Image: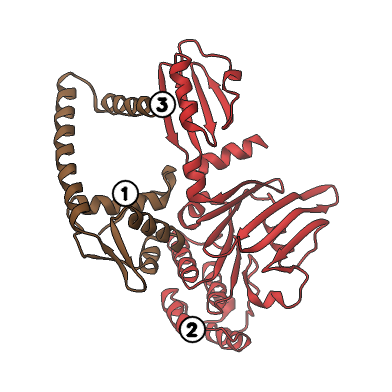
Amino acid sequence: MILRLNPSTGVPIYLQIVEQIKHSIEIGALAHGDQLPGIRVLAESLVVSPNTVVNAYNELEREGVIRLRQGAGAYVEGGEFANSRRRRFKEASALVKEAVKRLREMGLTDDESRRLFEAQWIEEMASR
Amino acid sequence: MNAVVQTTQLTKVYGTNRALNGLTMTVPRGGIIGFLGRNGSGKSTTIRILLDVIRQTSGEATILGEPTRSATVRRRIGFLGEDKRLYPYMTVEEIIAFTRPFFSTWRRDTEARLLREFELPARRKVSSLSKGMRTKLGLLLNLCRHSEFLILDEPSEGLDPVMAEQMLQSLVQQAADGTTVFFSSHQISEVEQIADYVIAIEKGRVILEGSLDQLQQQFRRINLVFDDPPPPDAFRRDGVDHVIVQGRTISILASHNVDELSALGPLLAAKSVEVHPISLKELFLEKVKER
């Protein structure tokens, strides 16, 4: 598992850890039963506060992605979460692939497409 | 909240200069707290009051639950200042051996590990060490103590990038061992990287205080583009920290209520609405500007 954090994007570091661990599961780099590094080890290797790693692991446990065993570390919770996520992820990436292809065929630049996506999400958010 | 430091309306006046101007802050126990501010914002003055090196003009300050004047509390606190106060005639190993017996909580395993990691030359005299080496030695002497509360005043000052990273890593280790680490810095990037709690000051007052995760989730920049921008007063609403108008773009710094504020876009016929996360750097600069 290789995590790449960018502290200056304004996205909380604990969320970056959460998202990247989920992504590692989705692409199969982490599988059911795999042990995650301990809080201390991960904090030291990423050079972030141990509290930040604690927050990330708690969030992942709350979402059912990992299981924390008292004193024994963190394990990837397999089965359902990973499988359904991986399936959904595969379907979604086919959808995105098709959309990107069509947008390019229409002559839009990648930047323009990205802005369209973002605008759509904001509209959704605003109408919620 | 179990606080390690609590100050209330702290002021310090030097002649006509107000170094601290009603500084009220609470430093939570546990984790790494970044004390952020420009040069001359009052960081060192605050730290010197906490350590009872100087006394405040008015206001209250407690440290580890005791008044800063308490003679006993100082032994529970580690401190690394800009002035390293190391005996120049001793060698590295002599000064370590000299310091060790003063502290019952001294850990030899930490000592051995840091000597190795910091690559300190055991037989060299302190007087012949570079500034970076001296900082690392001062850091080692403090970290081996495993004190309850460690205060560092601009610890990365004068360190090269590799040394600075090592220093930050050692602070993470110390926090993982249960020490509350409080470090002052004017470098936003290092605060952003390792702190989980931030207190930012400007002109002797607190301008930003809270868990970094929370601040980053709470604040957003909302950019709205209009053909014909409404007056900025239209955005005087709950959650708006402030508004900048740049031609057709209106940029809002929002501290909360983001969904409702971005929904204003379509209501006021904005052509585009963008919501961006805001980095600690932007947030700090905005808050400094407000002062």
Question: Looking at this view, is B186 or B151 the one in front?
Answer: B151
Residue B254, how many percent across, how many down? 53, 33
State the residue at coordinates (20%, 50%): A26
Specify few, some or many for label 3: CA neighbours under 10 Å numbering under 14, 14-19, or 20 or more.
some
| Image location (x, y in percent) of residue A125 | 38, 29
Query: Badge 3 is on which residue?
Result: A126
Q: Say which chain tag 3 marks.
A: A
Front-lying residue, B163 or B124? B163
How far, Cα to Cα, is label 1 from label 2?
44 Å
Q: Is residue A1 left or right of residue B23?
A: left
User: Where is residue A53 shown, x and y percent of the image?
Assistant: 40, 60
Residue B29 vs residue B287, the one in the foreground = B29
Tag 1: residue type? Glu
Left or right: B204 as drawn, with respect to A62: right
Q: In the image, what residue type sits under mark 3? A: Ala
**Mark 1 or mark 2, which is nearer to you?**
1
Residue tagged by mark 2? B122
**Looking at the picture, how far across and down is residue B80, in whole percent?**
61, 69
Q: Residue at x 19, y 19 (%)?
A: A107
Seen at 65% across and 68% down, the residue is: B83
* Chain of the residue under the numbered disc 1 shown in the image: A
Res B73 → quadrant: bottom right
Inspect the image, locate mark 2, and give the three-letter code of the amino acid beneath it.
Answer: Ala
